[in-house]
Image (spheres, rainbow, N blue to C red):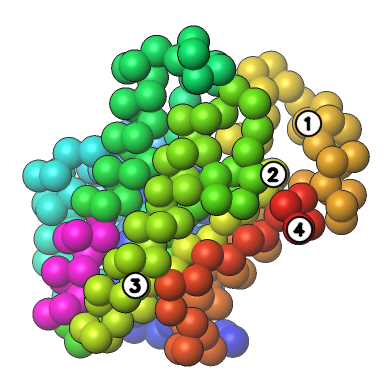
Amino acid sequence: MSGNFDAKTVLITGGAGGIAQATARAFAEQGATVVLAGRDGDRLAQVAAELSDAGKIDWVTADVTVDSEVEAMVAEVVRRHGGLDVAFNNAGIFGAAAPVGDLEVNAWRQVMDVNVTGVFLSMKHEIAAMRGNGGGAIVNMASNIGSHGRRPGLAAYAASKAAVSVLTRAAALDHIGDGIRINAVSPGATDAPMSLRPGESREDRDARLAPIIPVGRVGEAAEIAAAVLWLAGGESSFVVGHDLVIDGGATA
């Protein structure tokens, strides 16, 4: 598959995260120019430098909850690189864990703003750019917590990711006629910072999660990245509006 994304421009939101970094590396190694997006420019610059051995890595700052910033983000990618071919809308948060009856309204809104509105705004402006460029592919980050399974105390997160799954499918039907394929990935527990509880080591996390995952381990970020590349590439040209669960059998 080497060179599968030659001359393609790929935008990844939440670009400093563990899965984002693995995905950026995989795209760059296959010839793409990758643009990482996020709120922390210093962190993005650091990540871009760390990944520079893989290929062409750029970055741009944006808050995905702010329409004008998302519009500017996409416009800047197009200005710098001549177009937008692939987008991986990866930005997301867990938010505060609490039973529904105890969940603060602001905590609920923050999760919805980032996880749902952020994906909507990103797709809105990515689609506009891709329409003018002959089409493209979008992959949204959902989760196995949502449409596929639930956990106590994570109602806001589950609701937001279920919304991403449905939004993905609706957008896919709306825009396949524009030559834009839209799909989602729904990872389970993955070896990335988001899977760690405060103060928890990777070893403690693995011991906590392995017994409840049928395959007996957490996922690797590279495994999620491989799924994103498949959904974004030509091998999946007949896959539209799919939500691909990658969780070692946890929600089978």
**Which residue appears at 47% of the width and 63% of the height?**
184
Farthest residue, direction front: 101
Name the kind of residue labelled 4 in the image: Ala
Q: Quadrant of the C terminus?
A: bottom right
Cα gap from disc 4 to disc 1, whole angstroms: 21 Å
- Secondary structure beneath dot 4 equals loop
Residue 91 picture quarter: top left
Q: Residue at label 2?
A: 189
Cα gap from disc 4 to disc 3, whole angstroms: 24 Å
Q: Report the front residue among 73 and 172.
A: 172
Q: Residue at label 1?
A: 205
Cα gap from disc 3 to disc 2, whole angstroms: 26 Å
Q: Residue at label 3?
A: 172
Marked residue nearer the N-terminal end (4 or 2): 2
Name the kind of residue labelled 2 in the image: Ala
Name the kind of residue labelled 3 in the image: Ala
- Secondary structure beneath dot 3 equals helix
Task: Judge left or right: residue 211 versus residue 182.
Answer: right
What label does residue 252 carry, if any? 4
